[in-house]
Amino acid sequence: MTTTKRFTSFREFYPYYLSEHQNVTCRRLHFIGSTLVLTLLILSLFTGQLRLLWLLPVAGYGFAWLGHFKFEHNKPATFRYPLYSLMGDWVMYKDILLGRIKF
């Protein structure tokens, strides 16, 4: 789905975000990347190895973008809606954990 619409709220954006994540492999890669981000963040904070923090965007965006380019065949929403897209990643992560979105 390609859109030129400017979203005025996250509530308005999230259905669009989900429409850009219909492929189950893409969603799984997002989930893996987000889980790695959380793991790296916790690990770096508890061990004091803050040099691991540079891996956060690599893990998060790397898996997500692989999902979009290889499986979903679209451009990540991050390029047009960076803040809403980041919020969408974590809301989708929560929705997957709660079983609201197929994993």
Image: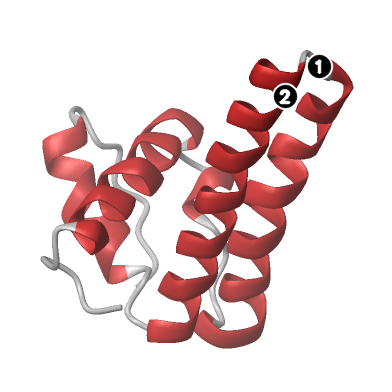
Q: Is residue 29 left or right of residue 83?
A: right
Q: In terms of image quadrants, where is residue 2?
A: bottom left
Q: Is residue 7 left or right of residue 63?
A: left
How packed is label 1: few (under 14 Cα within 10 Å), some, or many (20 or more)?
few
Mark 1 touches mark 2? (CB < 8 Å):
yes
103 relative to 6, above or below: below
Report the number of discs: 2
Q: Earlier in the sequence, mark 1 or mark 2?
A: 2
Q: Along the horizontal axis of the image, is 81 left or right of 84?
A: right
Measuring from the top left, give residue 21's x and y in whole percent. 37, 71
Which disc, if any, is residue 50?
Answer: 1
Of the residues shown, which amino acid type is indicated by label 2? Ser
Residue 101, horizontal then vertical, whole percent:
18, 70
**To which residue does mark 2 refer?**
44
Q: Quadrant of the N terminus?
A: bottom left
The residue tagged with tag 1: helix, strand or loop?
A: helix
Residue in the image at 51% along x and 49% along y? 34
Q: Quadrant of the C terminus?
A: bottom left
Q: Label 1 is placed on what type of residue?
A: Leu
Label 1 to label 2, Cα distance in Å?
5 Å
Q: Residue at x 72, y 57 (%)?
A: 62
